[in-house]
Every structure is written in structure tokens, then in C-alpha cells.
Image (tube, rainbow, N blue to C red):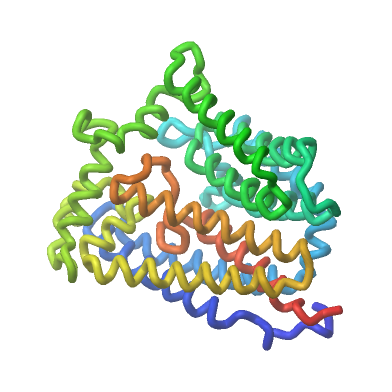
Amino acid sequence: MSRYVSFRDFDWWLLIFVLMICALGVWEIRSATAHTKFAGAHIKQVYWIIAGVGAMFGMSLFNYHVLLDRAHWMYIAALASLMAVLLFGQKYLGARRWIKMPGGAHFQPSEWVKLVLILAVSKYFADLRHRELSWPDFFKAGLLVGFPMALVLVQPDLGTSLTYIPIAAIAIFLGGLQLRQALSVALVGAVAVGVVFFLPQVRILKPYQQQRLTSFLEPEADSQGAGYQVLQSKIAVGAGGIWGSSTGTQTHLAFLPIPQTDFIFAAFAEEHGFVGAMGVLLLYFIVLMRLIQNAQTAPDRAGTFLVMGVVAVLSFHILVNVGMVVGFMPVAGIPLPLMSYGGSSVLFMFLALGIVMNVRMRRFVN
């Protein structure tokens, strides 16, 4: 660690609010999994959080410029890990997303790839010196994110692949996006969505993936199939009322499938009501504001891009997950950061926060 860097510049308030969210997550995981085959999952979550905090402090010690200088090697390693998943990955529920590690643990490379993409995209845009983004720059950034996104989509893991998009989007916006470019991309995107969903000859998405992306519009049409999770989630949120339900029928009677993962917010809203749900969202809002403040005080362009990349991913996760739970967004398999059960997601989030702390601690380094 540089002798000019001190943990006095560490964002301790950010860490406090993050740990408050984690504590609520552990509490809800314990409640949601009691008397099920997943009982005890909250203990594993605590271990992951402890490991994540350690990883965050470790990440904050490395000068982020050193990480940026090695971003191209990390990007190659990320692509290699995604290829390894396709060749040797563990298959579970029809998807090949995990690599089995010694000791029985499972590692999901697509989660840490988000971190690598934040570094790679930040490095690319930090090296650009012109104010306005050219079309070649735009396409290069798209390819930078597009390659790993395609490899994750093949696994298939539609949800995680979608989380790569905001990394590119925020960097392109901050990099000098022009209005005509934004309008052109919006038009191309609308055409692409139409082709994927309305031309049966195009098989980019599997039928069940298309169903998951459209079932939220009318879940009652397939209440025992694609629309089941959305319906049960909405019932759970509504059953919570203002102060919450002590019985937690939807969660505890297993109407809400695997509530400790993607639908943990629905389980929390049922047990703690509107007040509890708004409290969680307030904590997330505070965390996002602290992150944006750190981006504003970053010592250079690269630091700003790094922190805003973390903001983009975190915001996307929260928006889609909460929207999914209340029936405003498609069920895309995106966990709620810091609350949903899962080691890979927790570690990624704390490593990303470690990069934020890294940038913050070097605000006054010349």
C-alpha cells in the first residue's frame, strides 16, 4: 500500500449501510428457509459476507491504476473462464453456469466477469481523449461487452448476461454519447427486439426464455407455468400490508419458490410490510448516493468510470429485481444485491465495493 494512502479515507459510512442491508438479508434468509431443506443457508451467507468484507479490504489496497494496466489480461482470463464453463461446467436445472471447486464449492465465473468488464471498459474510455464519442469507439465498446455477454447467453443465463449492458451504457453515456447515436441505437434495439420476439425463425432466445420475458405482462394466462412466480410474488407483497404479516403464508408454506434467492424482496415485504420494504429501498438509495459522491470526488477520469460502473450494475440489479417482484419487470433471474443468497453474487459486490474504496482512498494522492 502506498504510504500516502490511509484507511482514514475509507468510506466507513458506506460500509455500515452495506452491512445493514446484508444483515437484513441474512435475517430474511433464516426466516424464509426455516423448516425447509435449505435451513442453515443463512450461516453460509454469513461466511460469504465475512469473506467478502475481507476481499473488499484486500482490493482497496491495490492501486486501481495497476488493475487498469492489467485489465486486458484479466479480460482474456474472463473469456477463458466462460469458455471453461461451457466445456467443463456443472449443469444444474438445465443450465451450465458453475465450475465445481475443490471442497465441493461452486464458482460462477459470469459474476466476476462483471468486475473485469468494469475495469476493461473504464480503461478503454479513460484512454480516449476526445470529448465526443465516435462511431468506431461506440462499436469497440459494444464488442468489448458483447463477447462475454454472448458466452453467458449460451450457458444459458439470460439474467446475468443482461447485467453487462449497463456497464457499457454508463461508460458510453459518460464518454460523450451524442443524441443521434442514442436515437440510432434505440431504433436498432427496437427492431432487434421485434425480430427476436416476432420472427419464429430467429432462435436467439429459447422459448422458455421468451416466456419469462413476457409472462409478467399477463401472468394469469399461465398461472401454473410461466406466470406462477410473478403471481405468488405479488400475492406475498400484497399480503404484507403496511406492517407485515406474522404468518408469512406465501413464504413459509412454499407458495413462493426458493424465496431466499431472486424473490427475497417479496418474502421480506410479506413479513415486514410496506414500511420494511421502503426501509430496505431507502438503504439502497443511501448506498447509491454514497457511491455517486465517490465518483464525483474521484481523482481522475478512470476512477469516475470505475465507480459509475459499479453504480450502473447495482442500480440495474435493484431496479430489475424489485420490478420483477411487483410484476413490473420480466422474471430474468437477477438477484437482489447483498440480500439474495449466493456466494458468487456477494463476493462480486464486495470486490466491486473494494474498487470504489480503492478510488476513494486515493483522492488526495498526487
Provide residue 184's location: percent of width, then percent of height.
63, 33
Q: Quadrant of residue 93?
A: top left
67 sits to left or right of 113: right
Query: Among all residues in the image, which is located at the extreme front?
Result: 180
Residue drawn at x 22%, y 56% is 237
Residue in the foreground of this view, choosing between 35 and 190: 190
Provide residue 171's location: percent of width, then percent of height.
68, 51
Provide residue 115's location: percent of width, then percent of height.
65, 54
Residue drawn at x 33%, y 52% is 263
- Above or below, comparing residue 6 to residue 283 in the picture: below
Provide residue 325's location: percent of width, then percent of height.
31, 50
Query: Among all residues in the image, which is located at the extreme bottom?
Result: 8
| The N terminus lies in quadrant | bottom right
- Above or below, comparing residue 198 to residue 308 in the picture: above
Residue drawn at x 51%, y 16% is 202
Label tally: 0
- Above or below, comparing residue 242 to residue 6 in the picture: above
Residue drawn at x 18%, y 52% is 250
| The C terminus lies in quadrant | bottom right
Residue in the foreground of this view, choosing between 65 and 77: 65
Query: Among all residues in the image, which is located at the extreme top?
Result: 201
Q: Quadrant of residue 293?
A: bottom right
Residue in the foreground of this view, choosing between 253 and 307: 307
